[in-house]
């Protein structure tokens, strides 16, 4: 009898402990997947992705040259429908509460996203954001292309889309499209073909060909920014990685420890580590985008004349791209650890993220 009592007590204790652990909110469910796909979550890279798998808020999705994934949105987003993440795309999936209404944001670093959705009820919002613009849905179907050179194409197949930048906005409706070249404003462009897949593919190809015409000129800005931000990122990351607080938080997470966001210890820990997190976050807003764009450009530069173009004394375009690819594995591991640290912070912040306004999500423009 006594033995049974202790068994029951142990089960209840374990159940209580696990029930107290904050669960990552669900973003959606995989409807379709093909090709090379990876999902980075809580410092782990998941490559075995299948239909029916759950996708969580703040997951980072990266598709290869042959990768496509379709996600059915969860009702917590306030939307019904799907988003399609096309090949050669890197994106974060975000949701935050704004005036009691969910605000869904796909933060695109590079690549292509398509949406087909409708509001369920209330006043939810759905946006696709790049570093320089935010595309907000007013209807049901649209696509966004963020090219490796920093250009943006937005096309609408149903309803309407509002494209905003620096406080100004342009609205397009069914059958219309706008583009934004690096350093320029949005302008309307004619949809020359009835098939939007073909239209977007041609726009991407034309953008790459324009880049190939003078790759050194196009990459000079990115090289200077990459050098500057790489140094800032690595210095800030080293301080975070050495933090005994982060080590403690990771250990607590592994042990499924109960977290009290209001305890004096937690408040002290948050105050001590927040500076490291904010410094890295500010750097990554631009640095990540440059990194993923340069990775995409490798396919279009390798074994072409563009590879030999001189970017700086003693440095060719090919040299610069090869440097980025050689640093890729280490960089992505560091970013994954930082995002994990963000998550651990948020768990100790009552589930509320550090970044509660649009500027925190999207940062400042690279055009400036």
Image (cartoon, rainbow, N blue to C red):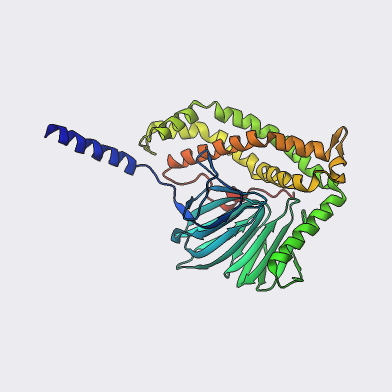
Residue 302 picture location, percent across and down: 80, 43
* Of 346 and 253, the residue lying toward us: 253
In which image quadrant can residue 159 be found?
bottom right
Q: Residue at x 63, y 67 (%)?
A: 161
Q: Is residue 257 left or right of residue 330?
A: left
Q: Residue at x 77, y 39 (%)?
A: 321
Residue 310 picture location, percent across and down: 88, 39
Residue that protrudes farthest toward the left in the picture: 1
Q: Residue at x 55, y 44 (%)?
A: 47
Residue 201 picture location, percent across and down: 73, 61
Of the 4 image quadrants, the one containing the N terminus is: top left
| Camera sees residue 141 | yes
Q: Residue at x 78, y 58 (%)?
A: 205
* Of 182 and 350, the residue lying toward us: 182
Residue 66 picture location, percent across and down: 65, 52
Q: Is residue 355 left or right of residue 162?
A: left
């Amino acid at each position: 009898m006594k033995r049974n009592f202790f068994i029951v007590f142990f089960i209840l204790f374990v159940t209580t402990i696990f029930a107290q652990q904050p669960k990552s909110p669900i973003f959606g469910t995989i409807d379709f997947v093909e090709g090379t796909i990876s999902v980075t979550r809580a410092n782990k890279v998941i490559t075995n992705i299948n239909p029916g798998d759950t996708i969580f808020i703040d997951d980072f999705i990266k598709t290869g040259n042959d990768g496509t994934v379709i996600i059915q949105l969860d009702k917590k987003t306030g939307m019904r429908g799907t988003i399609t993440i096309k090949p050669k795309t890197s994106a974060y999936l975000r949701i935050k509460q704004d005036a009691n209404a969910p605000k869904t944001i796909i933060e695109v670093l590079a690549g292509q996203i398509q949406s087909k959705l409708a509001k369920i009820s209330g006043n939810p919002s759905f946006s696709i954001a790049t570093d320089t613009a935010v595309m907000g849905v007013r209807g049901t179907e649209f696509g966004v292309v963020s090219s490796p050179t920093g250009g943006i194409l937005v096309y609408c197949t149903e309803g309407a889309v509002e494209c905003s930048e620096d406080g100004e906005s342009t609205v397009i409706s069914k059958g219309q499209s706008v583009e934004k070249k690096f350093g320029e404003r949005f302008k309307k462009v004619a949809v020359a073909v009835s098939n939007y897949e073909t239209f977007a593919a041609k726009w991407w190809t034309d953008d790459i060909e324009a880049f190939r015409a003078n790759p050194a000129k196009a990459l000079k800005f990115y090289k200077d920014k990459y050098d500057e931000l790489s140094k800032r990122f690595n210095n800030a990351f080293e301080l975070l990685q050495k933090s005994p607080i982060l080590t403690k938080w990771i250990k607590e997470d592994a042990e499924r420890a109960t977290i009290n966001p209001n305890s004096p210890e937690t408040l002290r820990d948050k105050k001590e580590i927040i500076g490291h997190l904010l410094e890295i976050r500010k750097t990554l807003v631009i640095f990540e985008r440059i990194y993923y764009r340069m990775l995409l450009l490798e396919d279009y530069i390798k074994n072409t004349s563009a590879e030999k173009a001189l970017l700086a004394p003693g440095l060719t375009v090919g040299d610069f791209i090869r440097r980025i690819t050689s640093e890729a594995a280490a960089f992505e591991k560091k970013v994954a650890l930082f995002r994990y640290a963000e998550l651990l912070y948020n768990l100790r912040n009552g589930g509320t993220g550090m970044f509660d306004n649009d500027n925190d999500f999207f940062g400042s423009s690279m055009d400036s």
